[in-house]
Amino acid sequence: MRELKAKPRTELGKKTNALRRAGFLPAVVYGEGMKSQSISVPYKDFEKAYKEAGESTLLKLEVEGKPYNVLIHDIKNDPLKGYPLHADFYAVRMDKVIRTKVPIEFVGESSAVKNEGGVLVKVMQELEVEALPQDLPHGLRADISALTDFESKIFVKDILLPKGVKVLAGPEEMVALVEPPRSEEELAALAQAPVAEAPEEVKTEQELKREAKGEENVVEETGGKTETKKV
């Protein structure tokens, strides 16, 4: 299990900017039966741990010598630069089943894509599962080599689940398929398709008469009274 060391922090609000400049990520650890605690972790250590564990694999988080079995529960990223600004660590009970989402890892090679020029369509990117924390997989593998033609499909039931893992999606839900490439005729038709015109504004007879005379109504409020004038 990947280990990550943290330390308590007192910097809150705008003061966390100085913490970030010093190379630390503001974070919080919380869980069932424990009080939420503000912490910080070194940016580089966090990035390595997140790359290995993602949000579905257990980490051992140590805060001043006290260990917690945690999941990276949520990350707040900078909207422009994309780097993390804050992280939530959820401390789990090892004897209690939890529910989380696990990414689907597409492996293998589809002959329908390689030989027929088809387009791989990933209908699902992740699956929600239930398992004990120690049984949670880093990812679920979907072998696209089963997609041999345009009629082939991969369903939830086709994904091999590790022991102790229960997937919550229906077995007949589609995970991936291959669509045939567009023909030259289809591409040409798309290129020549007319651009939708804006809908015509429907005007009343009075509006048309006013436009013909170059007049329009102007509403003014003076002294609490409303007056309508023609200009």
Image (cartoon, helix red, strand yellow):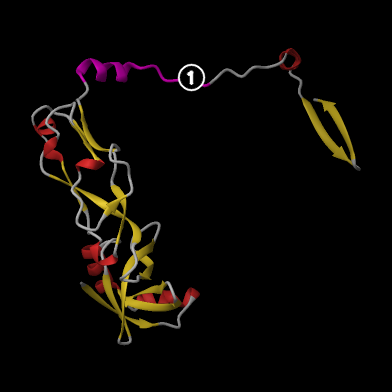
Q: Is residue 193 magenta?
A: yes
Q: Give the quadrant of the C terminus.
A: top right
- Corner quadrant of residue 209: top right
Q: Residue at x 25, y 56 (%)?
A: 165
Where in the figure is residue 159, as x and y percent of width and height?
A: 20, 45
Q: Residue at x 23, y 41 (%)?
A: 157
Q: Answer whether residue 121 is visible to the viewer in this image.
A: no
Depth order, front residue of 20/112: 112
Q: Which residue is mark 1?
A: 197
Q: Residues within 10 Å of mark 1 (few under 14, many from 20)?
A: few
Where in the figure is residue 182, as x and y percent of width and height?
A: 22, 22
- Corner quadrant of residue 133: bottom left
Give the magenta part as a residue range: 183-198
Position of residue 89 in the picture relative to residue 51 (left or right): right
Q: Residue at x 76, y 23 (%)?
A: 216
Q: Look at the numbered disc 1 and give the secondary structure of its residue.
A: loop
Outermost residue, bottom side: 65
Where in the figure is residue 109, as x and y percent of width and height?
A: 10, 40
Instruction: Name above or below for residue 87 compared with residue 181.
Output: below
